[in-house]
């Protein structure tokens, strides 16, 4: 639900962005700055009245498609576009986080590859989109088949996970509660909804924990693993978010 403050902020943002744009022909005789509303309307292929109502903060609720055309007409950057849609309370149809098959952003892939400690990256569905050799060795069984490895699926359905995590029940519940915090942002991604539905069908433990509706912030801290070859291992877990793609995460484990 869009609040009155959001409508006013949206209107002020659109107007400021319109007035900052240089009209075609660089007409210096103008007394008003930037584009006129009718000029922006022509660029965005929407009605002038819509632009006026949006700038006035009226409760008109433009569609996502209308906002997408407005963003194009205003030549918004990715950050500005995200701000526009968040103020409007709409989901951006071009939101990268909703595209299936997204690979790790270049900065994340580079970081994971340079780490000596176990390090991996999670996409919006918590699939492993990048992992270094140390992580592949630690998470026994996670990378063994040809499918895209998924951290939640591994924890709740792979028998090796129960052996690797001495405190499996506590860790599984914690991980799922952290995932739920991201779930609201990822519901538009078909991979996310498919994962949740599939795990509810496959794992009674997942279904029970999911129905508990527990939500927790992602926190680091001590993590213990019982590796079949390396024995009992102790780490401190750290998690970073990508600056440009906030729906991706980098997790690395500092040896204790």
Image: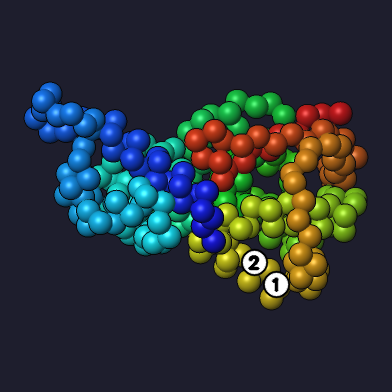
Query: How many numbered marks does the figure carry?
Result: 2
**Disc 2 marks which residue?**
196
Residue 54 seen in the current view: yes
Q: Secondary structure at mark 1?
A: helix
Name the residue furthest front. 31
- As drawn, 199 above or below 155: below
* Horizontal side of residue 170 vs 70, given as left or right: right
Going by the image, does 63 lie left or right of 145? left
Picture residue at 51% right of the left edge, 40% below the top: 245
Q: Quadrant of residue 201?
A: bottom right
**In the image, is residue 172 above or below residue 222?**
below
- Residue 155, horizontal then vertical, whole percent: 75, 57
Residue at point 45%, 47% (across, down):
8
Residue in view at x 61 percent, y 65 percent: 195
Q: Label 1: few (<14), some or many (≥20) within 10 Å? A: some
Residue 227 horizontal side relative to residue 62, left or right: right
Up-down relation of residue 18 to residue 211 (above or below): above
**Whole-percent x, y for residue 216 in the image:** 77, 51
**Image position, residue 127 (x, y; %):** 60, 52
Which quarter of the figure has residue 40? top left
Residue under circle 1? 200
Is residue 95 among what the camera can see?
Answer: no
172 vs 48, nearest the viewer: 48
Q: Quadrant of the N terminus?
A: bottom right
The image position of residue 178, as x and y in percent, is 73, 51
- The structure residue drawn at horizontal position 21% and vertical position 50%, both measured from the top left corner, is 41
Crowd rating for badge 2 (residues with CA inside 10 Å; few <14, some 14–19, many 20+): some
Please give the label number shown on residue 78.
none
Q: Foreground residue, 151 or 160?
A: 151
């Amino acid at each position: 639900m869009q609040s009155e403050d959001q409508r006013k902020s949206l209107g002020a943002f659109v107007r400021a962005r319109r007035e900052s744009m240089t009209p075609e022909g660089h007409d210096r005789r103008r007394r008003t700055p930037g584009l006129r509303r009718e000029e922006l309307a022509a660029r965005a292929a929407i009605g002038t009245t819509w632009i006026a109502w949006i700038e006035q903060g009226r409760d008109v609720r433009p569609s996502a498609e209308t906002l997408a055309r407005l963003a194009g007409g205003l030549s918004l950057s990715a950050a500005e576009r995200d701000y526009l849609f968040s103020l409007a309370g709409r989901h951006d149809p071009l939101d990268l986080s909703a595209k299936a098959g997204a690979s790790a952003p270049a900065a994340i892939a580079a970081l994971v590859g340079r780490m000596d400690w176990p390090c991996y990256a999670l996409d919006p569905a918590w699939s492993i989109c990048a992992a270094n050799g140390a992580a592949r060795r630690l998470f026994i069984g996670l990378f063994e088949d040809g499918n895209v490895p998924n951290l939640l699926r591994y924890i709740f359905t792979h028998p090796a996970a129960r052996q690797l995590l001495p405190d499996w029940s506590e860790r599984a519940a914690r991980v799922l509660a952290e995932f739920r915090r991201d779930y609201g942002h990822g519901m538009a991604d078909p991979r996310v909804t498919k994962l949740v539905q599939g795990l509810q069908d496959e794992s009674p433990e997942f279904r029970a924990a999911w129905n508990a509706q527990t939500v927790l912030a992602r926190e680091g801290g001590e993590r213990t693993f019982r590796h079949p070859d390396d024995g009992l291992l102790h780490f401190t877990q750290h998690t970073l978010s990508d600056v440009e793609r906030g729906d991706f995460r980098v997790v690395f484990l500092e040896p204790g």
